[in-house]
Image: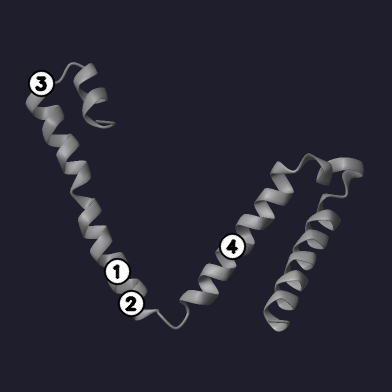
């Protein structure tokens, strides 16, 4: 619908807008199959890649969302401190079980 409605609004026929809408959706199952085989072939690195992605998300949240981190222009120190604190907390959580 995100593709078909703008095409129809531009004055094209219903058939053409429907065709292009369906054509834009056909790549999803193809990409899913490619993604499945990519993940299954890189299974050994997947935990590290997911950990990197989680770290990147934590960095973005601390750097951009938490307003206290921007006080006194110490954003980098606050971000690094929060990430190190989180890493230490996780190490202690896993190590002391």
Q: Which mark is residue 73?
A: none
- Structure colour scheme: one colour
Distance from the alpha carbon under mark 3 to that under mark 2: 42 Å
Above or below 28: residue 13: above
Distance from the alpha carbon under mark 4 to that under mark 1: 20 Å
Task: Give the mark nearest the N terminus, 4 or 3.
Answer: 3
Instruction: Residue at 75%, 43% (x, y): give it.
Output: 66
Residue 11 found in image quarter: top left
**Residue mark closest to the camera, 3 vs 2:** 2
The location of residue 87, given as percent across then percent down, is: 73, 70
The location of residue 75, given as percent across then percent down, is: 82, 50
Residue at the disc numbered 4? 54
Instruction: Residue at 27%, 59% (x, y): give it.
Output: 31
Instruction: Residue at 80%, 61% (x, y): give it.
Output: 80
Residue at the disc numbered 2? 40
Distance from the alpha carbon under mark 4 to that under mark 2: 20 Å
Q: Look at the numbered discs 2 and 1 and tell me whether their residues touch, using CB distance below 8 Å.
A: yes
| Front one among 79 and 89 | 89
Distance from the alpha carbon under mark 3 to that under mark 1: 36 Å
- Disc 3 crowd rating (10 Å Cα; few below 14, some 14-19, many 20+) is few
Distance from the alpha carbon under mark 4 to that under mark 3: 45 Å
Residue at the disc numbered 3? 13
Residue 14 found in image quarter: top left
Q: Look at the numbered discs 4 and 3 and tell me whether their residues touch, using CB distance below 8 Å.
A: no
Task: Give the mark nearest the N terminus, 4 or 1.
Answer: 1
Residue at the disc numbered 1? 36
């Amino acid at each position: 619908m995100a593709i078909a409605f703008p095409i129809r609004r531009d004055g094209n026929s219903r058939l053409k807008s429907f065709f292009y809408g369906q054509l834009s959706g056909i790549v999803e199952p193809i990409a899913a199959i490619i993604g499945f085989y990519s993940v299954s072939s890189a299974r050994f690195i997947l935990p590290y890649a997911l950990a990197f992605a989680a770290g990147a998300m934590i960095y973005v949240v601390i750097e951009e969302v938490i307003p206290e981190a921007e006080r006194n222009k110490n954003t980098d120190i606050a971000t690094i401190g929060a990430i190190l604190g989180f890493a230490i907390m996780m190490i202690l959580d896993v190590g002391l079980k």
